[in-house]
Image (cartoon, grey):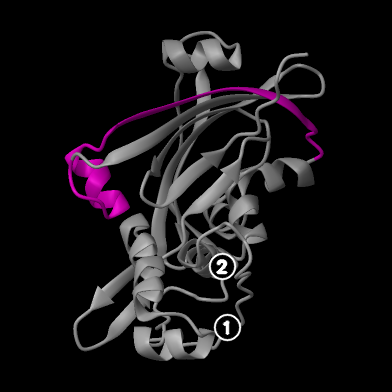
């Protein structure tokens, strides 16, 4: 179990933003940057309030807001402990492995299945092949800090690139494509949500019926060829997509 790491906080008492919210935002940022890793202990509320010159109710409110988000947990006899950070992934053509690595989340992969199988109608339509034609299936469990984050299921055209078990466990699929000289250009993607089945819940360490984010993506290279069809499940408690919205002129 990691010990409490002293952090520096900058609170603006002249700001209209409540002090508890300023503190909770800075604590959340420290968790997301990995400065407070899973298992880290915060000082008790009295010590933290004294160090920051805040009232104990202000510190308690800041901590409670992160408890409510699932980032912290109060344990009797232990104190307030970091559980995990939620991954906030930008909506761009990048791989989960690269996004986790860039965020300091220590990604790891467990290969669940790697095989050649006949394309279903959905997969065939996405990849532009005949239904029943051979396609490569790669199914993986992606972890961060040793904790399950997502189940990734990808279908690829046969002969696109050489893959083996060890390579798939040590790096991301898009990185392997780039190494093979494939230039990723664009993708068509849809995002949804549904409840976890019993098998999915067990795999992702969630209770049965827990909310899961779903994502389907067909990725194209710079020649317009479909090079990948992904059908992924993400833990809603650990994962979010970030959008940037622009107003129409």
Left/right placement of residue 222 relative to residue 38 reads: right
Toward the viewer: 160 or 169? Answer: 169
- Do callouts 1 and 2 mark residues in contact (Cβ within 8 Å)? yes
Distance between mark 1 and mark 2 Cα atoms: 10 Å
Above or below, 33 against 217 in this view is below
The residue pinned by badge 1 equals 7
The quarter in which the N terminus is drawn is bottom left
Which of the two labelled residues, at mark 1 and mark 2, occupies the earlier sequence position? 1
SS under mark 2: helix
Toward the viewer: 228 or 93? Answer: 93
Residue depicted at x 78% and y 47%: 179
| Residue 166 in sight in this render | yes
Residue depicted at x 50% and y 61%: 18
Q: Residue 142, how many percent across, how many down?
A: 46, 53
Above or below, 205 against 245 in this view is below
Q: Is residue 193 magenta?
A: yes
SS under mark 1: loop
Q: Which residues are magenta?
A: 181-208
The residue pinned by badge 2 equals 26
């Amino acid at each position: 179990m990691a010990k409490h790491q002293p952090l520096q906080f900058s609170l603006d008492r002249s700001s209209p933003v409540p002090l508890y919210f300023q503190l909770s935002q800075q604590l959340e940022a420290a968790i997301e940057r990995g400065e407070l890793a899973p298992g880290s202990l915060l000082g008790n509320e009295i010590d933290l309030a004294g160090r920051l010159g805040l009232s104990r109710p202000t510190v308690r409110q800041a901590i409670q807001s992160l408890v409510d988000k699932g980032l912290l947990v109060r344990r009797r006899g232990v104190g307030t402990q970091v559980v995990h950070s939620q991954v906030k992934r930008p909506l761009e053509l990048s791989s989960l492995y690269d996004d986790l690595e860039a965020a300091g989340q220590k990604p790891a992969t467990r290969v669940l299945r790697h095989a050649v199988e006949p394309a279903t109608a959905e997969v065939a339509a996405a990849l532009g092949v005949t239904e029943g034609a051979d396609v490569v299936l790669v199914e993986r469990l992606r972890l961060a800090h040793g904790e399950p984050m997502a189940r990734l299921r990808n279908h690829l055209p046969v002969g696109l690139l050489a893959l083996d078990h060890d390579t798939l466990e040590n790096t991301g699929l898009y990185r392997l494509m780039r190494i093979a000289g494939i230039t990723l250009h664009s993708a068509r993607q849809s995002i949804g949500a549904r409840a976890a089945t019993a098998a999915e819940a067990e795999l992702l360490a969630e209770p049965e019926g827990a909310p899961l984010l779903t994502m389907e993506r067909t990725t194209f290279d710079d020649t317009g060829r479909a090079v990948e069809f992904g059908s992924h499940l993400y833990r809603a408690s650990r994962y979010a997509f970030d959008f940037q919205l622009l107003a129409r002129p």
